Structure formats: structure tokens, C-alpha cells
Image (cartoon, rainbow, N blue to C red):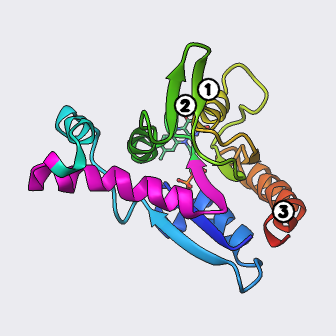
Amino acid sequence: MKHVLVIESSISGKNGQSTQLIEAFTKNLPAEISIDRIDLQQQPLPHLDMPEIAAWMTPADERTAEQQALASQSDQLIERVKQADAIVLGVPMYNFGVPSQLKALFDRIARAGLTFKYTENGPVGLLDNKPVFIFATRGGIYQGTGADNQTPYLEQFFQFIGLKEQYFIYAEGLNMGEESATKAFDAAKKRIEELTHKLAA
Ligand SMILES: Cc1cc2nc3c(=O)[nH]c(=O)nc-3n(C[C@H](O)[C@H](O)[C@H](O)COP(=O)(O)O)c2cc1C
């Protein structure tokens, strides 16, 4: 394991609870592991729109300067995902879903012909499998219930592009009093200890 892509999506930036769990996970990694970091609070992506999709659909050598700039956002993100041996993702729950900043990134990573394709047997992910560590922080408690819309969405999204090895680390009940939050962080940190060896190997 050499290279890890960290994606932070909390609107609280470095103070985000998901960002702090990422920090707890990455700080103990062996020094030889390099980290590439996307901080979506510092560098938010705009909503995906048709001019950007049209730029993707235009052959690279026929793109205008504006289309080149538009297409390069997605091209560069996909390249960073491809270069990584593992992905570490912070995902707070905002209004029952993922942060819109993260959705804007997903919208640029799912690209027909580059990260997935449709066949007569259905969709096929085109990325090489690699572990994805998902740090899911929530004010309430949803894990394992029908109200957890995030987990199946994230599972499906990463499977769709070929990333089947997924590890979820939950910290839930963070807005349900101090005792609940402490218990959730302790449980998350225990799970982090269990999982760190997967990156250190
Ligand atoms: C705009 C907003 C919406 C939220 N929506 C939910 C929600 O639907 N369910 C929930 O359990 N917590 C919700 N929360 C609480 C966050 O999930 C919780 O505080 C989480 O730990 C935030 O992670 P972060 O600090 O990394 O951003 C919301 C928080 C904010 C700021």
C-alpha cells in the first residue's frame, strides 16, 4: 500500500467530526504511505451541468478552450482515484443524504466509458478494485435501519464503478448528548484500530 486518496466533505472543514475521524485513521499510517487530499470545503465543486457533460462527450482534440477546462475537472479527479491504492472518505449525514459537495464529486467520477460501461448484462465498473474506507458521522442513529439511505447509496455508487471492497466506520448519535457522542467516537476509534492494518500491509 503506497498511496491513499483522502476525500473530506464536511462543511466544517478540519473541525468536522468526519474529518477528525479521518485524521485519527491516517495519522498512524506508516511514513512511506503518501496522501493525496481533496478538501471539498476549501475547494468546492460546482453542480454538474450540461455544458460540462457536453465537454466530456466532445473528443479531446476537438474541445474548445472552455470545454478543455470543464472536462479537466472530471479527468483530474478520475486520475487521482485511479492513482490511489485506497480511498478514505469522510461522509457526514446532511438531511438524510451525503453532502451536496460530495455528490458533485461523485457526479464527476461516474463517467461512461472511463469508470463504468453498460453491457447487455447490465453495468460494469471499470476501475481496479481497491479498498474504500468510509467515515460516516451522524447526529442521530440509523445504521442497520431502513432510514439509513446513505449506506446503500454509497455501496451502490462504489460498486458501480468497480470498487467492491468497502469498509464503513460509523460514529452515530453525535447530537444525542455528550455520553452518546463519546461512546460513538470510542467505538469508531476501536474500529479504526482494527482497520489500520489493512493500509499498513
Ligand atoms: C445541514 C445539516 C444537516 C444534518 N442532517 C442530519 C440528518 O439528516 N441526520 C442526522 O443524523 N444528522 C444530521 N446532521 C448532523 C450531522 O450528521 C452530524 O453533526 C455529523 O457528525 C456532522 O459531521 P461533520 O462534522 O463531519 O460535518 C446534520 C447536520 C447539518 C449541519
**Callout 3: helix, strand or loop?**
helix
Q: CA distance from mark 1 to mark 2?
A: 7 Å
Local packing at callout 3 (Cα closer than 10 Å; few below 14, some 14-19, many 20+) is few
Which residue is most to the front?
61
Determine which residue is flagged by label 3: 198
Q: Is residue 159 magenta?
A: no
What residue is shown with label 2? 96
Q: Is mark 2 within 8 Å of ligand 1?
A: yes
In the picture, measured across the screen, residue 79 lies left or right of residue 142, that is: left
| Residue at position x 26%, y 49% in the image | 71
Q: Are marks 1 and 2 in contact (CB under 8 Å)?
A: yes
Name the residue rendered at 53%, 67% in the picture. Answer: 15
Q: Secondary structure at mark 2?
A: loop
User: Where does the magenta region start and end?
Assistant: 62-91
Task: Kindly identify the amino acid type of the residue bearing the numbered disc 2.
Answer: Phe
Q: Are marks 1 and 3 in contact (CB under 8 Å)?
A: no
Residue at the top extreme, as displayed = 120
Mark 1 sits on what residue?
Answer: 149
Which mark is in front, 1 or 2?
1
- Place of residue 122 in the rendered image (x, y in percent of width and height, measured from the top left): 58, 17
15 horizontally vs 66: left or right: right
Quadrant holding the N terminus = bottom right
Task: Examine the rendered structure and indicate whether residue 60 appears above or below residue 146.
Answer: below
Q: Quadrant of ligand 1?
A: top right
